[in-house]
Image: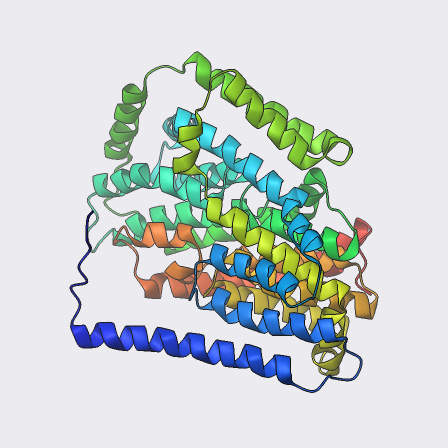
Amino acid sequence: MEYVIDKRPILIVILSRFSRYLAFAVIAAIFLYILQLPQPTGLTPEGKKVLAVFALCVPLWVFTLLPPAVTGLLAITLIPLLGIMDTKKAYSLFGNEAVFFILGAFILGASVMKSGISTRISLLVLNRFATSPRRLLISIFIISAIMSFFITEHAVAAFMFPTVMELAKSCNPTLMNRKYSRNLMLSLSWGCIIGGIATFLGGARTPLAIGILYEMSGVKIGFFEWITYSFPAVASLSIIALVLIFKSANYEGVSINDMKRVIEEKIKQIGRMGMDEKFILLILLLTVIAWSTYGHEIGLANISFIASISLFIFKLIRWKDLEEYVNWGVILMYGGAICLGKALETTGAASWLTQNSVKHWISSPHTILIFLIATSMLLTEAMSNASVVAVLLPIGINLFTFFGFDVRIATLLITLSAGLAFMLPVGTPANAIVYSSGLLRISDMARLGFLMNIMALAIIYLAAKIYWPLLGLQVN
């Protein structure tokens, strides 16, 4: 057995553990305090209990005191234990279609990354279109964005990072052209972030939101419908991001020839496309077409599993490969979050919370929209975007239900905004990955990211007020 020795000073270790235990004690005390409170008017006993569970899980997700998956398991365990919902019903929610769609999407993504298709396509596009320093920035951004349509954004950032890092090194970053190397990294992270909100596949937060929406309201949003709703935000933010990247870069002393040699050398190393890669690419394309055309009839999860099983039938992937590429913890976290959202809705707790808190100071549709967008963006800079969805969406759906608005707009507002963490390395794995390069300062990310957040708030707000009503989604 291998033992890991903590080399920090013993006082620091003790204080760190004490702070952690103190945080658990405070959260547990709040949980127990809510449970023993007198029954509030208009709230069922089960509703009070589920609010206590909600108050317990929110800080655990926000401050990551436990792994998000463990917090999800805690929620799905406490709900039947406290008599909020019977055990069979609570655990059946773990079988929500959204959870299995996420699993199928992870398997497809694993096959794409394991086979090297994603790396091959990105290198070929870079070699074809990156003919100048500006076009290289555009190419990295567009490749990252489009790849994030089909693979989770953090996975795209992970497999693109080594290539972009070598390109940055090849331009010999100095004080003169450090801004160019920095913006290569921004092109990568911003492309992943913006592309990640376009479809169900860019981040598992979107299937989670769709699952919570369906369990709480019975309303569905299809694969192609989501793309239609998100398109203006994705297109507008892409243009704004590229303008900011162009304006803030310094092209002096940057030679594209050195970077082209890096790309060409990598293309030689990977060789020609094999038959397995072609089969995987064909299955992926057919799957996306099936999601877009038969998603409602067959079911997104069923299509995902048909594609996944096909990969194993043709021996295009092994189960061992999934252990490396599939984040099993996300599956557990999402099952718990969907169960908690359903419990908040069925007990009337979310409705009671909305009517007795938020509605007192939200007086117009404009205020509601800005509140949800800004709160989602603020929270997602400090906690996982999936946790933001799990915390805010049940409240948002009930808020929209109370005011008579289309609950699909609440889902879009919160989910799109929660995916747009531009400012800090902790906001999203894509930011953390590019920050690890050492070419980006937090001040750079915060300054440019703040501008992106302001523009994103305005764009999503305008989409809710102007564009989505054209598609039948009304907010007033």
Q: Quadrant of residue 269?
A: top left
Q: How many marks?
A: 0
Q: How is the image coloured?
A: rainbow
As drawn, is 337 to the left or to the right of 463? left
Q: Nearer the viewer, residue 161 or 205?
A: 205
Q: Estimate the x, y position of residue 95 in percent, counting from the top left.
A: 65, 44
Q: Position of residue 165 (x, y in %)?
A: 28, 42
Residue drawn at (40%, 30%) of the image? 321
> Percent x, y for residue 404?
84, 66
265 to 471, vertically: above or below: above
Query: Which quarter of the figure is the C terminus placed in?
Result: bottom right
Q: Nearer the viewer, residue 320 or 399?
A: 320
* Vertical position of residue 141 compared to residue 291: above or below: below
Q: Is residue 18 above or below residue 191?
A: below
Which residue shows up at 60% across the image and 69% down it?
54
Q: Is residue 249 visible?
A: no
Which residue of the protein is positioned furthest toward the bottom in this rendering?
38
Q: Is residue 141 left or right of residue 343?
A: left
Residue lying farthest top?
275
The spot of residue 468 in percent (x, y) is: 75, 53
Between 109 and 319, the one nearer to me in the picture:
319
Task: Work out whether residue 439 can be spotted.
Answer: yes
Report the side of 278 relative to 389 (left or right): left
| Residue 284 versus residue 384 in the image, above or below | above
